[in-house]
Image (tube, rainbow, N blue to C red):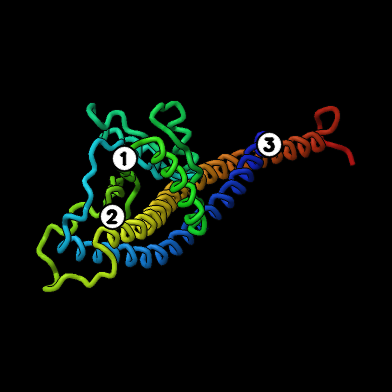
């Protein structure tokens, strides 16, 4: 009886864990749906700024500044929470492939997300660790903290090149240059016959476009990374739930087998009791 009760207790505990993990999976799925709407709007904003910059640079290519002797800074967008498979390890593998021996070997790293920062706690290249976002509503606050860290680095170094390592929806982990911006834009022929009418100098307009672009691009990256993180979490939890269901079914079979053994033992006791009453004290027929 005690063995079966222990199995039933274990099975009850697994059922409670399954309920919690099922709720986590549902919340992660709902977050992906919400982020998909946010990301669609944010991507449109980013494309509009890129189109405006490409139009400007196609007529004024000399306004794009040249960056020399800049310190490379890799902004790593990891996860704040767990249950997302190899999400953070994939970032580090891609980063390692991007940093061979050479000038970038001394690059600086900014780790976003508690789980990623834990993996890099002994890495001397990390100059800042920033708590990540768990929901879309936290992206703006996270962006403020990231910008503050970048501004601090700019006061210590003459020039920076900022590259963001993050998960994308269609292409896996990618490295996206952020600063200097608009790399490769404006190299083709102009899309219009006349240059844009400007109230400011092209360099001033480009500087303002850069500020808006960094804000929009970082928002898009954070939304994208958070959506892929939740997609990983849904897949990871689905696998965990299947494993729990398998364990629960196995415990149910073992519990049923023990219950059958108990029933057989009870029947044997009843039969032995009936036999002893029938035979009587001397082994002969019982007296009534």
Give whichever of discs 2 and 3 has the lower sequence position. Answer: 2
SS type, badge 1: loop
Helix, strand or loop at mark 3: helix
Residue identifier under label 2: 170
N-terminal of the two: label 3 or label 1?
1
Mark in front: 3 vs 1: 1
Q: Which mark is residue 159?
A: 1
| Picture residue at 25% right of the left edge, 70% below the top | 198
- The residue to which callout 3 is attached is 265
The image position of residue 276, as x and y in percent, is 79, 34
Q: Residues within 10 Å of mark 2 (few under 14, many from 20)?
A: few
Residue 269 visible: yes
Vertical comparison of 51 with 118: above or below: below
Q: Please report whichever mark, 1 or 2, sits nearer to the chain's N-terminal start.
A: 1
Q: Foreground residue, 73 or 286?
A: 73
Report the Cα–Cα distance between label 3 and label 1: 82 Å
187 up-or-down from 157: above or below:
below
- Specify the quadrant that holds the N terminus: top right
Are circles 3 and 1 on residues that touch, CB within 8 Å? no
């Amino acid at each position: 009886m005690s063995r079966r009760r222990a199995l039933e207790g274990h099975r009850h505990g697994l059922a409670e864990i399954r309920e919690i993990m099922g709720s986590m999976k549902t919340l992660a799925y709902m977050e992906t749906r919400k982020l998909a709407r946010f990301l669609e709007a944010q991507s449109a904003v980013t494309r509009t700024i890129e189109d405006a910059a490409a139009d400007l640079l196609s007529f004024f290519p000399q306004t794009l500044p040249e960056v020399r002797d800049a310190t490379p800074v890799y902004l790593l967008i990891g996860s704040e929470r767990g249950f997302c498979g190899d999400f953070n390890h994939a970032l580090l593998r891609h980063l390692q492939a991007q940093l061979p021996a050479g000038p970038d070997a001394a690059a600086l790293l900014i780790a976003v997300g508690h789980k990623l920062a834990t993996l890099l706690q002994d890495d001397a290249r990390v100059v800042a660790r920033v708590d990540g976002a768990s929901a879309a509503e936290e992206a703006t606050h996270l962006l403020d903290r990231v910008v503050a860290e970048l501004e601090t680095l700019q006061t210590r170094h003459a020039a920076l090149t900022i590259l963001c390592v993050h998960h994308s929806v269609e292409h896996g982990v990618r490295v996206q240059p952020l600063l200097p911006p608009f790399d490769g834009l404006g190299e083709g022929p102009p899309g219009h016959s006349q240059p844009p009418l400007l109230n400011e100098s092209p360099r001033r307009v480009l500087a303002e476009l850069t500020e808006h672009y960094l804000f929009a691009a970082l928002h898009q990256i954070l939304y994208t990374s958070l959506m892929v993180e939740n997609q990983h979490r849904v897949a990871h939890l689905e696998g965990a739930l299947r494993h729990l269901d398998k364990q629960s079914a196995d415990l149910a079979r073992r519990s049923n087998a023990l219950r059958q053994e108990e029933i057989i033992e009870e029947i044997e006791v009843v039969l032995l009791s009936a036999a002893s009453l029938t035979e009587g004290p001397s082994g002969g027929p019982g007296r009534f």
